[in-house]
Amino acid sequence: MTIYRKPYIESSVFIAFIKGETQKGNHDCEKVVGSILEAAKRGLFQIFTSSLTIAEVFKNKKSIGLTEQQNADLRPYFREAYIQLIEVDRAIGERANELCRTHQRSLDIPALRPNDAIHLASAERAGCEVLLAYDPDLTKQSHESLDIRWPEEIVQIAPPPLLWSPDEPLLQEALALSDGLENGAISLMLPEATETKEPEPEK
């Protein structure tokens, strides 16, 4: 089962989730990202993202913006306790500037854009081990401490099955007995203690 420790989620993931997009290979973004949000809500881990993400989810570079309803549905997620926002301050800006200079265009890897550099710098500050994104220009980038890749679905593990079915007579009888003992309706009949006499001494 895929599990994350401290995942960072970039804006393209939130956009794909709320729009219900399907990526190549029948990758259901709503289902995949929804499973990650649900796992974080259950306390398995905390999600990190930049405050910049709130502005970026207006639209990504190659698609139309969110509808009014989609925007209204998405923005409350950024107020959830299981999603921690990393504020963009001077230190983040300085680090993003450095990352842009060290991630210049080479062969088939595009140059790192300033907004994407802010996401990388924010993930660094949070101590994340993975940055989840659908943006192909970002997923082509490399980083010494961050694994930059698509999100993966978190499959919930079902609880173990009962050893007996609740419909089985034996289990029903045991449950009825247990309820009766708790309610005082059934009393256990224990044998009475008998006094033992010591043999009389011989005369």
Image (tube, helix red, strand yellow):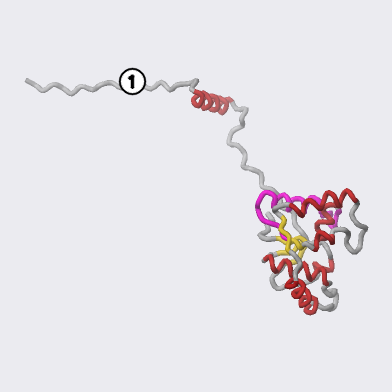
Q: Residue 86's image quarter?
A: bottom right
Question: In terms of depth relative to the viewer, which is nearer, 103 or 78?
Answer: 78
- The magenta segment is 21-48
Q: Residue 40: within the magenta?
A: yes
Placement of the C terminus among the 4 image quadrants: top left
Residue type, numbered disc 1: Glu
Q: Residue 95: within the magenta?
A: no
Residue 28 shows in this picture: no
Secondary structure beneath label 1: loop
Location of residue 81 with respect to 201 vertically, above or below:
below
- 55 left or right of 154 in image: right
Q: Position of residue 120 (x, y in %)?
A: 75, 69
Location of residue 107 with respect to 157 vertically, above or below:
below
Placement of the N terminus among the 4 image quadrants: bottom right
- 49 left or right of 175 in image: right
> Residue under circle 1?
192
